[in-house]
Image (cartoon, grey):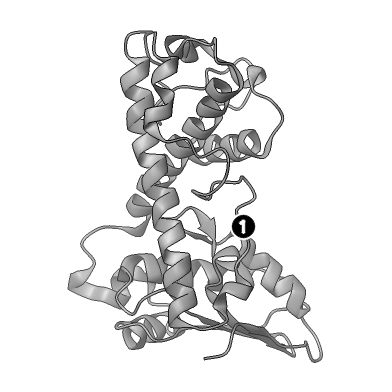
Amino acid sequence: MAAATVEVTHGAGPTEAEAFGALDVVLDPELDEPITDLGFVRSLRVDDGEVTVHLRLPTSFCSPNFAYLMASDSKDVLTSLDGVVRVHVELDDHHDSEIINRGLAADAGYKGTFLHEAEHDLEELRATFRRKAHTAAMERCLTALLRADADLPEADLGTVRLGDLPATAHTEALLRRREAVGLPTTDDAIVMVDHEGRGYTADEVPMALRRARSTRISIDGNAHFCRGLLATRYPGADGDQTARADGAEPSDPTFIPLATLKEHRP
């Protein structure tokens, strides 16, 4: 199957580049990456203010609630663009494509689409993955500090403040994730906190950091795996994938195996 295509705009409405760029804010909730970077946008067409988008996923059995969330968010984002009169979002090659596409076309909402199968509200799901994304972003920043300073005791990470972090893509990503879960983003805010803003004592830091690292490794590993699955399922799709802006791919130099961090233990 062909790689993603973005067709030229005809008449009124946003350009194809503007419509495609707007989808950058739509994230895969589990992988914490934009669907545009992951290569999930199979095609996009704009014609007289009417936008048609086809989405594709790594497998036909990807979680239906994740699939619906991405498709629904895509429709909401595109509908909000100036000059857009109608948006069609279709999910291709998924075992629930028919159900999801019908629900999107009718603006039925998640529960209206899946009826009795919709056990939980989508906002609850979204909140869960926002918290995981914050945990992973926090761990990346703190692990980078350990890597940069071999003399930094791991237990001291509990006193690090946002203003102590270097101006990097990791820090920018952490600030965005903190804002998403309602945490302060001022320079005096403590970095190592849970999603409710509670910090950790020096004795609690090592275990908390290891739990956070487990979350981050899971997210990064799943993203790496899904990229490969998509490229296998749709030959040429890897050409539509771009690296994470915060350098979170497992092959990146900032990826540190657990064993190499023993030297940082007090």
Residue topped by disc 1: 243
Tell me if I can see residue 82 in this picture.
Answer: no
In the figure, residue 201 lies in which quadrant?
top left
Q: Is residue 262 above or below residue 219?
A: above
Residue at 69% from the left image edge and 79% from the top image edge: 84
Residue 59 x %, y %: 36, 76
Q: Is residue 77 above or below residue 203?
A: below
For label 1, the crowd category at 10 Å Cα-Cα, with few meaning under 14, some 14 to 19 and many 20 or more, is few
Tell me if I can see residue 4 in this picture.
Answer: yes
Q: Is residue 96 above or below residue 125?
A: below
**In front: 130, or 85?**
130
Q: Is residue 67 left or right of residue 61?
A: right
**Amino acid on which the number 1 mark rests in the picture:** Ala
Residue 190 x %, y %: 52, 17
Q: Is residue 189 left or right of residue 221?
A: right
Number of numbered callouts drawn: 1
Q: Quadrant of the C terminus?
A: top left
Residue at 58% from the left image edge and 40% from the top image edge: 253
In the figure, residue 20 lies in which quadrant?
bottom right
Residue at 53% from the left image edge and 40% from the top image edge: 177
Dot 1 falls on a residue whose secondary structure is: loop
Q: Residue furthest right?
A: 11
Residue 220 x %, y %: 45, 50
Residue 136 x %, y %: 45, 38
Residue at 44% from the left image edge and 16% from the top image edge: 264
